[in-house]
Amino acid sequence: MAHREQDMADNVVRLRRGGGNGGAPSPTAALQQNGGGLSRRPELTEGERRGLMRELVRDGGAAVQGFGSPASLREADRKKWEHEPRGEGEYVYLRDDFKELVELEGRLSRLIGIHQDKVVAFATGMTAITTIVEMEAPATGDLVMYGNDTYGRVRRYLVELERRGVKPGGVDTLDTEAVGRYVDKFRPKIIALETVANGPNGPVLDLDAFFSLRALSDEGYRPLIILDNTGATPTLIPPTALLRNDLRVVVVEAGMKFYTGNGESLGLAYSNDKKLLWDLREERRTRGGAASLYQVRALNEIISFSKAEFDERNRTVMRNNMIVARACYAAQGDGSVFTVWHPNLPDHPNSAYANAHFPKGAAPFFHIQVTDPAAVSRDDIAMALGKVPEVVEGRLFGHSFGGPETRLLPEYLQQNIRVSAGIESGWEIRNLASNIRRALDKSPEEWEKEISGHGNGEQEERRSTPEGPTLSIDGLDAAAGAALRQIG
């Protein structure tokens, strides 16, 4: 019997080294042939059992009782596993570390630009966020800091922690100094910020200033720092700019946006902190945060593009978004009707940082904010945009961002419209930008006339050929033309 078990282990070694198995069974089949549970095989040494068990998990076999191993069996956790064995009677749940999930995390790691062992996939972005926070177990009196422009559902979840006695606190991330004062004064247990916030003001986090905060250099202060990089993507802000070996930083993304083009839900987290990753995988297991087998299979089919294709697509979205934002900015006039908030525009508080670090576009979305809703409301502006030829064609009003086409979203309960660009070609996005600009470029008197119904509200028809529109940026006024040419 000992010889048969040793043969199995030898076969595993040959498989791991890429050699053939000479007709030997797979690790799973070998285990089945030899009666099942590894823990009932005293002839195997502890190292042999562990090596074989790792291969069984990779091979997608069945759960094994009594082996005492964690769900995550990656090499990054090997030393911790060997020195801190789990208790007897525990199970390996292959449903949350099956081979298709390992494959998915490998695909994600290549797009992010990080080692696979540092990536943890979740069913949704919200699942990733809540699992990370619950892993930290904030209790009565603990302070949790978040950005005021944080995604609404995340903000709601964090605010509701107050029911447990936790003290959630928002900070204006447009003001870098305010962020520093908050952290230095209150020393929150959890810091949750978006690198490029999906909020009306569209703040961009000054990472240089943030990581230089005095409090973060205090050895006695070790907060959990959660950085949501969904809006920026690893294309704009790579992991090397976010992760620190001396700080407990975990980056999260709602992968449904740029990784699946809104085709399937996905959340992901990555970090340099091995203990944090270990705990996060355990928490994912406890809370059932992993995607199902069928969801993972669908994701592996969708996420079949290269890192170069991923980055090129994301850069196109950022560039297109800035083209449309600048066209709208040229139409805002004195701002008495609306203002445009995009981090690369000169009036934005973070424009100096954004233009220095992301000159070709710092965000995939921007907001048109109504100045006086009593005079011209969000719906009035939405109706004007509804006459733009591309919108009349039924393509543009819709939710989310990161998809193939530009989307306009009148925000629920807010007096603003979010615009999120797609991957349209250069002439398509310029034509769209000029049409949107003409729809918005009205004096207060012209807005009043249109709202009252006295204006015909007709838009000049778009004239185009298969090669491109006859309406070029030369047909715009000097300000709009210069804005569009600036990044042409």
Image (cartoon, grey):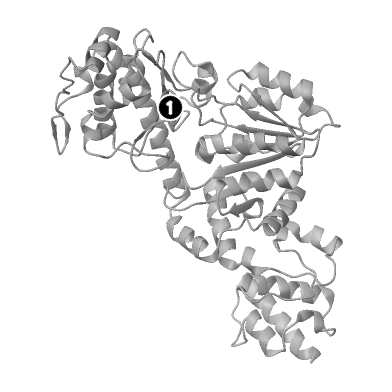
For residue 11, side relative to residue 414 (left or right): right
Q: Nearer the viewer, residue 373 or 37?
A: 373
Q: Work out whether 156 lies above or below 100.
A: above
Which residue is at 67% across, 48% downward?
131
Q: Position of residue 145 (x, y in %)?
A: 69, 30
Which picture quadrant has residue 379?
top left
User: Where residue 16 appears, x then y in whole percent?
Assistant: 65, 72
Image quarter where the N terminus lies is: bottom right
Residue 316 in which image quadrant: top left
Q: Position of residue 462 (x, y in %)?
A: 16, 29
Q: Picture coordinates of residue 47 (x, y %)?
A: 81, 73
Where does the C terminus fall, quadrant-wise? top left
Which residue is found at the position 72% from the left and 21% from the top?
A: 182
Is the residue 446 above or below the residue 378 in the image? above
Q: Is residue 272 visible?
A: no
Q: Which residue is mark 1?
A: 366
Which is nearer the eye, 186 or 428? 186
485 above or below 372? below
